[in-house]
Amino acid sequence: MPMRDAARAACVSRVFLNSWRCYPRLTLDTETLGIHLDTDEEEEKIESDFVSRVDHIMQNHSGNGLKKVKIRTHPCRNLHPSNVDRCLQIAISPGIEEFELQIYRRRNMEYDFPSSLLTTARGSSIRSFVLTYCAFHSTMTVGCLSSLARVYLRCVHITGDELYCFLSNCPALEQLDLSNCSDMIFLKIPHLLIQLNLLWVQHCHKLQMIEANAPKLRDFNYTGMPIHISLGDSSQVRVIEMHCEHESRMIYFARTKLPSIAPNLQILHLSSCNEVSVVSGKQLRCSQNLTLLRKLHLVLIVLLWNMVHK
């Protein structure tokens, strides 16, 4: 039963009320909460309704049996951190499997996710963990997240050291997706992540180095300027995508570095801007024109890989 229907049924039935207190899947956003985003309605009223309804739901939920929680605060941009903290105290309960927190952009206030909630008792069952638009510090307080298989961080303030500390507690991790994490200067994957098979790093503008010694890594996606990349024992890497939105030497980088980075590569997706490369005696120019880039895309994949293996 959809969450809204379950909540309505709980209002008129004691049986449903008891089941509601153990409802396993909660999606808390303005749509599921029935908050109408009237353009004439004041932002403060929308935020007040959002906080009131979320508090009411969480206070009436025991936390028992909770498996999947998604909290999306859009368009409430000025929620006080204490309001989010109250919700998370129940949302991250023993037995939780999927957790997602999307904080809408805030004015003069940054939400710092309480990593202390990710203790071994609370977090050992989590399989998917998603954070957006917040800070994630003090990762040394994180317990062993033995079931965590997927991590997605977007616009999260976290340093390379803090991320390394967090990943060191995720031995079952299979997928790591980082986007717009601008505080990271380096990304180092702990050796114990032997199950990691997918690594995506996009638009982390301060990043200067990636070191990933993950023996089962098969899919690597990077968007940014050419940096030092080491994939360790990368014999399993089959798919690489590398994109650059600004002027760079991405084609040159692929031609000179990829043979040692991924010797058994099968599929290469590569895009670059304002770069001239010599391929079989011919000049191949990448334009900023996206249509031309799409036309050149397949040609780059085939010709560059042939050139790399000469």
Image (tube, helix red, strand yellow):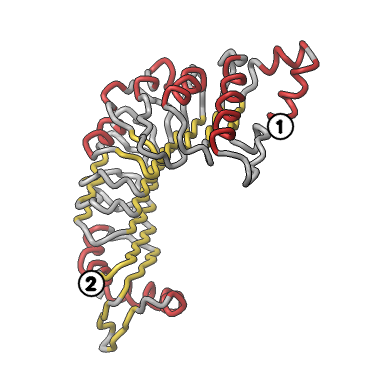
Residue 231: percent from the left, percent from the top?
25, 50
Front residue of this view, candidates 78 and 219: 78
Instruction: Compute the Cα span from label 1 to label 2.
Output: 52 Å
Q: Can you identify the residue that label 1 sits on?
A: 2
Report the mark closest to the observer, 1 or 2.
1
| In the image: residue 293, left or right of residue 204 | right
The answer to whether 44 is drawn above or below residue 175 in the figure is above
Q: Can you identify the residue that label 2 sits on?
A: 252
Q: Amino acid at mark 1?
A: Pro
Q: Amino acid at mark 2?
A: Tyr
At x 22% / y 54%, what residue is drawn? 229
Q: How many marks?
A: 2
| In the image: residue 222, left or right of residue 55 | left
Q: Residues within 10 Å of mark 2 (few under 14, many from 20)?
A: some
Residue 175: percent from the left, percent from the top?
41, 42
At x 64% / y 38%, what residue is drawn? 31
The answer to whether 92 is drawn above or below residue 194 in the figure is above
